[in-house]
Amino acid sequence: MKQRVHSFYEATARQRLALLLDADSFREFCGPSARQISPHLVAIGLPPSFDDGVVVGEGTIDGKAVLIAAQEGGFMGGAVGEIHGAKIAGLLERALDVRPAAVLLLLDTGGVRLQEANAGLVAMGEIQRAVMDVRNAKIPVIAAIGGRNGCYGGMSIIARCCDWIVMSEEGRLSISGPEVIETVSGVEEFDSRDRALVWRTMGGKHRRILGEADRLVADDIAEFRTTVATLLEQSRPTDLAALEAQHAALAQRLVLLDDCRDGVDVWARYGINDPDRVPALEAGPFNQLLDTLDRSPR
């Protein structure tokens, strides 16, 4: 009998969907049979994918209706092109009509597809606008990040526009990837081959300590599902007061962390004794540690 995949990090987009949603509840929109492939890749002689690297559709979690998109990191690093982006934007726009308990975005991407950069950038803008339209309608948008590619580039901006971000430690979240930072600033500034440095800077625990991720879970699809289920129908305000509070928190964080040069320094500044032990903590003990800290205001 074929062994079931439980690791979010190891799973494909379709495996994540199958285990995150209620059994046999998923109905795909614009699937491989529709043959909606990228015209740009074909034009330059690159092999396309019949779903263009993203699976979108509807299903249920604990019987509650959700819309869901899962990026396939195995196709072009989950990068966003015209068709890929249009499928995500269209899914979000559908939420305004069917009003699900949430829209789920399973993000596993390096950002915009360089081979169709202009179309990808336009798609990013359309997705961001659609996310805010859905949130303004009081329908929560939940990002789940834990794949091999992390969540970089324009899609990291999309993630931070969501109501909630659920991450595993294996997930990474950043505007620029490690190689980009090294190329621009030099290896002395950031060594992309230093995996420990990458995770101390961009990993799920660091983002959770900063408050940029809302939940930290183990690398297990069942844990992602359980956590996501608690966030269904839980929207956050998008009014001016909420925006101003976030700006004030960011300003305070800049002052608090101005002289920090490493994630370990940041963790210590937030009151974590022996911060060097943080990378070795499992999700449960890490969350227990976090509950003991006074990190407000941020």
Image: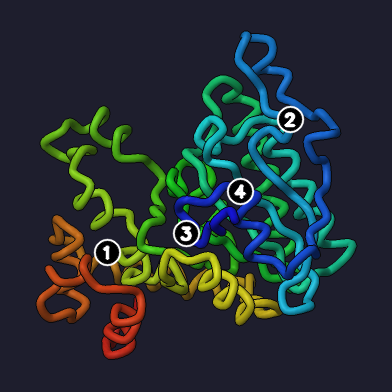
- Which residue is drawn at the image coordinates 74% and 26% (left, top)? 37
Circle 3 crowding by C-alpha within 10 Å: few under 14, some 14–19, many from 20: some
Q: Earlier in the sequence, mark 1 or mark 4?
A: 4
In the image, which is nearer the foreground, mark 3 or mark 1? 3
In the image, which is nearer the foreground, mark 1 or mark 2? 2
In the image, which is nearer the foreground, mark 1 or mark 4? 4
Residue 219's place in the image compared with 194, above or below, is: below
Q: Which mark is residue 13?
A: 4
Residue at the spot of label 1: 254
Q: Earlier in the sequence, mark 4 or mark 2?
A: 4
Residue at the spot of label 2: 50
Label 4's element?
Answer: helix
Closer-to-camera residue (129/223)? 223
Q: Residue furthest bottom?
A: 292
Cα gap from disc 3 to disc 4, whole angstroms: 12 Å
Residue at the spot of label 3: 7
